[in-house]
Amino acid sequence: MKAIIQHNFTSGLGDFIADLSHYMTIFEEIKQKDYEIHLKISLNSNKYVKNPFFSFLFDEKTISFFDSIEENNEIISDFEYQGCRYFGSNHSPHSPGVHHFDIFFDVIPENFRFDVYDCQRIHLNNHIPKIIPGVSNEILNNVKCFWEKIPKNYSFLHIRTSDIIDQNNIRYDRIINNVERFIKETNINFHLGTNNEYIFKVLQKNPNIHVYNFKNYDMISNDMNAFFNGRINKNIESEILIERVKDIFTEMVSITNSKQIFYVYDISWISNFLFYPLGVKENKIPIISKNEWRE
């Protein structure tokens, strides 16, 4: 008996980690029933890489969970594939090859069901997956190096603005001014994580703001959605893209050391960028909304 998981890498890396945690958790019991578990990661139209990347991010235990792992541009859009039939997807539109991940079985296990995991559910409902993927030694070493460069007592500030970049910076300046006012009042140290290039470049000049040193930031900012608009820039070398995805995951993992998390969001949910630290820390990192800083 076998199962095929198609992971459609069409959204952010935080979504990727959440989805990976989801299907590893719900498939743990299936593995014990002697099912082969085959993972197919579709890199088609992703925002990050051209080439396989899984082994750079995750440890051997995570890799060996699967009987095989393929990473290529192939998309399974048919309802039957290699002797297996489409069972369902964990996200609409519930059609293979579109979004998040799809599952195919040759024999459907009894009582099998999806059990959605995301950062919003961790934060509000304490709904934490049993399995969260392990981190590669390279990423862990990068995390330790970063921790040595920032104060031990710090908070993470996550500023997630819209994927549609404003043509003027009035709103962004308002956020920046409110952050700096708060720093003056509290003398807090922030590790700033943001998809907004303008906010990133201005706030990092503040001595109480610490940022991860992303390689080749001048070539690729952290607003991957706006920068690539859903497709890889063919002019960027594969090695540079791999380094960026490793850096992004390093920053995610590093948040586990923060005392608390402050966020300013244009989105109406808790970003899955925080999925890994909140999941690993079992929802014990306090989260504080500062959405009023947008006003």
Image (cartoon, rainbow, N blue to C red):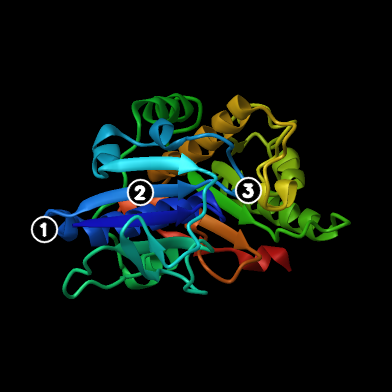
* Residue depth check, mark 3 versus mark 2: number of the one nearer the observer: 2
Q: Looking at the image, is mark 3 or mark 2 earlier in the sequence? A: 2
Describe the element under mark 3 as helix, strand or loop. strand
- x 68%, y 63%: residue: 293
Find residue 21 and report its image quarter: bottom left
Q: Extreme front residue here?
A: 83
Q: What residue do we see at 61% from left, 29% from top?
A: 238
Q: Is residue 178 left or right of residue 74?
A: right
Query: Label 2, on which residue?
Result: 39
Q: In this view of the protein, which residue sits in the foreground, 107 or 142?
A: 107
SS assignment at label 1: loop
Image disc number at residue 33: 1
Q: CA distance from mark 1 to mark 2?
A: 17 Å
Mark earlier in primary sequence (1, 2): 1
The three-letter amino acid code for the residue at tag 1 is Lys
> Which label was assigned to residue 194?
3
Disc 3 from disc 1: Cα separation = 43 Å
